[in-house]
Amino acid sequence: YPRPGLVRLAPIGASDQPVIPPPTTRKLSTMGHDLSRLYSTNECGDTNSISDESDTEMHTNRSLITSPSARSTLNNTVIIFDWDDTLLCSSAINSQQWSMALVQELERAAESALHTAMSLGETMIVTNGNATWVEDSAKRFMPGLLPTLAKLKVVSARALYEKSFPGDPYMWKRQAFKQLLTKNPQFAEDGINLIALGDQHPEIEAAQNAVEIIGGPSLVKTIKFKETPSVNELLGQLGRIEQELANIVYEDVSATRSLVKRELPSHLEHLTAHASGWRCSTKKSDMTDIASLAKCVTLKELWPLFS
């Protein structure tokens, strides 16, 4: 592990390999596609003190997994995670706001969340980082996660589509989702149950766009994480997602969610690092309005509406 406060990682090889900058590097934009600049020229105690209605409502119902309807759902369920600030605390690392103990705890939380997802459907990671960024950054900061990552499809949208859409990370994600999800003929016939998780809007829009293309009885459920989270905030968000993911998978409607930190009194601020410090704010997706709007304007024009 690199020592906290001394994160200056040398390039692995070629100049396009990810490098964590020294503390003097300017803070980067919170937009997901700018995250690549982060790496090179190329992304307690009183945990029961808060009542949480959604905790009871959204606990995983393990019996669902063995039911016929559940098995049918699992056959067409795809769960896609972003990497930076969704599984890895990239912003906290960039700003030197991390410690070895916290990142090791995050490693365990990310592993647990991914294993839960893998039990519920095909699980992937799609990043706008370069082709080796997920593996390289995991190796440096969360090496215990590597065996789990080896079992997943990890896709660099940038590596696939940067040449076709130079400087347009929106299209990288959009095309990557389209390529991954439309090549399965089963989805065209039976529909897809897509769950997309990330801290930026491009992956949310990419998921919605892919489902529109697939058509049929498809569902899209998106969960937006907080942008530029601290390590504690990312820990809490992953804990909340792990608790709620099964019920989200088995919902029979599309929905758009955001993870929102609860307003906590100072003596309960530590709950930020726990599931109980977060809630899922839900609204039903209006795919018709989104599709109509998308026909009239470009994705770049849509972006400010969601910023």
Image (tube, rainbow, N blue to C red):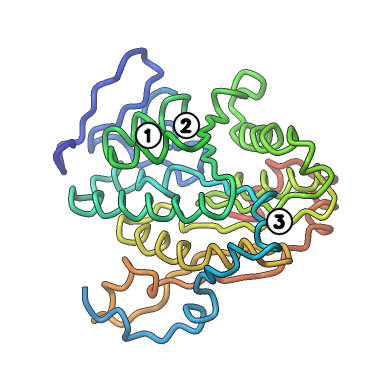
Could you classify mark 3 by the number of other residues whose Cα lies within 10 Å: few (under 14), some (14-19), or many (20 or more)? few
Q: How many marks overall?
A: 3
Residue 40 x %, y %: 37, 25
- Camera-side residue of 40 and 283: 283
Number of the front mark, 1 or 2: 2
Give the side of residue 40 with respect to residue 168, left or right.
left
Q: Between tags 2 and 3, which lies in front?
A: 3
Mark 2 vs mark 3, CA separation in Å:
33 Å
The structure residue drawn at horizontal position 33% and vertical position 38%, both measured from the top left corner, is: 26
Q: Residue at x 28, y 45 (%)?
A: 95
Residue type at the position of mark 1? Leu
Q: Earlier in the sequence, mark 1 or mark 2?
A: 1
Rendered image: mark on residue 72: 3
Element under label 3?
A: helix
Locate residue 242 relative to residue 14 in the image: left or right.
Answer: right
Q: Are marks 1 and 2 in contact (CB under 8 Å)?
A: no
Q: Are marks 1 and 3 in contact (CB under 8 Å)?
A: no
What residue does disc 1 label? 38
Location of residue 24 (image quadrant): top left
Q: In the rendered structure, which amino acid carries the disc numbered 2?
A: Gly
Find residue 128 and report its horizontal and vertical position in percent: 52, 34
Query: At label 3, which amino acid type do we have?
Result: Ser
Q: CA distance from mark 1 to mark 2?
A: 10 Å
- Dot 2 lies on which element? loop
Q: Which mark is residue 129?
A: 2
Alpha carbon distance from label 1 to label 3: 41 Å
Q: Earlier in the sequence, mark 1 or mark 3?
A: 1
